[in-house]
Amino acid sequence: MTSLNVTEMFEEEEVEVKAERTFPDMELAQKAFLLDSPEAGADLEAVKAELLSAIETDAMAPFYEYLCARHGWMVDEALLATMKAANAAEVAALASELKDAEENQGEMEVLDALFATAKFHARIGARADAYTAFDTIIAKPKVSTGKKIDASMHKLRVAIFFNDMDTARKLIESAKKLVEDGGDWDRRNRLKAYEAVYLMVDRDFKGAAALLLEGIATFTCVELCTYEQFIYYAIVTNLLFLDRPALKKKLVDGPEVLSALGNLPPCLATMTTGLYDCEYAAFFASLVGLHESLQRDRYLARHSRFMIREYRILAYAQFLESYKSVMVVTMAKAFGLSAEFLDGELSRFIAGGRLNAKIDKVGGKVETNPPDQRNAQYQAVIKKGDLLLTSVQKLARVIDA
């Protein structure tokens, strides 16, 4: 075989890999979100045109009807009729393949036909039909645990696509049980990525941060998001919880993070290094860009104000750890803020119990009030001791009975 033929063979294999698609296409869900969020600053007409082009290409009649009803669009009856006809023809062909597999072939062929039907409904945006089709696979006897996990994650992706988080939560719980029974390494890691997305939407950022950080080096879940998006989520969540040594090792100097930063909003690099290097003015300036970025993300937009507030509290707390007292003017200069604004913001956070400090208005300074760790540990021991005694008493009553 000549070198030219070898090159052509590799090119053909690459084309085949690129042609592999997964459904539903999560990028379409992101575009649909932008249409719902004019504050995100997207070109809505361009986004709509891209959505309609993708809908027509994949004959997504149910998804087209869903968007028309949601946004009050005038329905293109000719386009809808064409897509429905194409869908009906494909349904008939899939039903014929399934019947042939059931009558003339083996269990594997039947399972393949069932997956093809379910993926078709996921592709066109028929949520209820996709749920039913994947449930058929999950409930089918003699289906391996791995295939049941695959069907569960396919259904889970449909739920996330339509922001059906109640269904997503139930699917994650059931899929985790299946993984414990017999899931392989790849399925286990991919499920963690799905769970991380669910936890972000549910505002459990600490749980999401741990899963995202764990998955950086082993990410394979490209059907859910790109690797760059995964790194983005890992950074914005873990910044809230990592201590300084872990922040340095995992994010500031993390090779995977560094390799992806060039394709991410510039504010992320500034935030990460700014927090670690105590460059608070740069850190605060980067929050403007981060807020704009969060507003454009379908998972995090609803939490953008909360997250920006938590970043501010984090920076204030880190700064104050180094002082017993500091002048408000000095602190304001370090953060690039006015003294009046800083005074008002610190007052709110202190009153809310988020910062362990107090403001001396006469002296114009902030005095830190570090928590009493020994007293806190004592109270925790007392609380756990009470719980243990209650459990022992309940056990004693059961034994006596």
Image: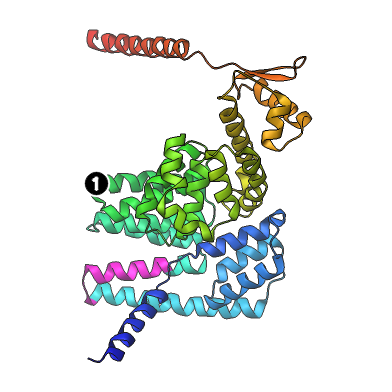
Q: Quadrant of residue 104?
A: bottom left
Q: Residue at x 37, y 54 (%)?
A: 152
Q: Secondary structure at mark 1?
A: helix
Magenta stretch contains residue 117: yes
x then y, percent, for residue 337: 73, 36
Residue 250 lies, in percent from the top left, at 42, 44
Q: Is residue 29 left or right of residue 295?
A: left
Camera-side residue of 39 and 210: 210
- Amino acid type of the residue that numbered disc 1 sits on in the rendered structure: Asp
Q: Is residue 298 above or below residue 360?
A: below
Q: Which residue is depicted at the point 50% across and 65% down?
A: 25
Placement of the N terminus among the 4 image quadrants: bottom left
Please state if 108 lies on the left or on the right of 320 as rendered: left
**Residue drawn 66% across the image and 65% down it:** 68
- Can residue 201 be seen here? no
Residue 11 makes an appearance in the image: yes
Q: Which stretch is magenta?
A: 104-119
Task: Name the quadrant containing residue 331.
Answer: top right
Q: Is residue 365 on the magenta stretch?
A: no
Give the residue number, with chain letter if any, for mark 1. 181
Residue 292 in the image: state x and y as whole percent: 66, 51
